[in-house]
């Protein structure tokens, strides 16, 4: 299974970005069979969970500050998950990573990066004027 994250870039404060996480793998692979989490890692800081979603539960947010600004969604027909980020702030600057966990785990446990089965590479988000 491979996850390909994309959509990062440079945006001014108050702007928006939509990150994508495209999944692919063996024949019959369905990203819908996985819970999806987004993490971020700011320069000089540890990776932190942002939010996650499964087909049966969620979303669960791990950062209160993004609850009114970030939205996670998925298009299972495209095997793609999305992170819509609005009203971006400089403190949102980070590398953003998507991750997948097979099944329908309890989302409140998915703050732990070790729970995930697969990871995409990071996509860089820079919020600056």
Image: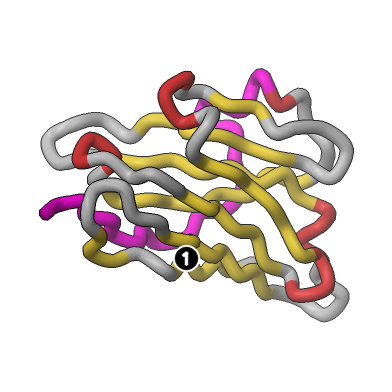
Magenta stretch: give its range: 108-129
Residue plotted at (35% across, 62% down): 123
Residue 118, magenta (yes or no): yes
Figure disc tally: 1
Question: In this rendering, would 70 be left or right of 31?
Answer: left
Does the segment drawn in magenta span residue 9? Answer: no
Q: Is residue 10 left or right of residue 4?
A: left
Does 78 sit left or right of 87 as displayed? right
Q: In which image quadrant can residue 107 be found?
A: top right
Residue at x 34% of width, y 55% of height? 15
Which quadrant is home to the C terminus? Answer: bottom left
**Residue shown at 59% from the left, 44% from the top:** 71
Circle 1 residue: 5
x, y percent for residue 50: 48, 33
The quadrant in which the N terminus is found is: bottom right
Answer above or below: position of 16 versus 65: below
Q: Is residue 81 above or below residue 61?
A: below
Residue 67 location (% of width, % of height): 53, 28
């Amino acid at each position: 299974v491979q996850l390909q994250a994309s959509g990062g870039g440079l945006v001014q404060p108050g702007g928006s970005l939509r990150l994508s996480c495209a999944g692919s793998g063996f024949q019959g692979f369905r990203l819908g069979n996985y819970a999806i989490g987004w993490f971020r890692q700011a320069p000089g800081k540890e990776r932190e969970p942002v939010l996650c979603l499964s087909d049966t539960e969620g979303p669960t947010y791990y950062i209160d500050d993004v609850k009114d600004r970030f939205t996670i969604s998925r298009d299972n027909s495209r095997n793609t998950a999305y992170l819509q980020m609005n009203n971006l702030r400089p403190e949102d600057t980070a590398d953003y990573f998507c991750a997948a966990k097979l099944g329908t785990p309890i989302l409140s446990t998915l703050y732990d990066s070790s729970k995930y089965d697969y990871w995409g590479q990071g996509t860089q988000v820079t919020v600056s004027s």
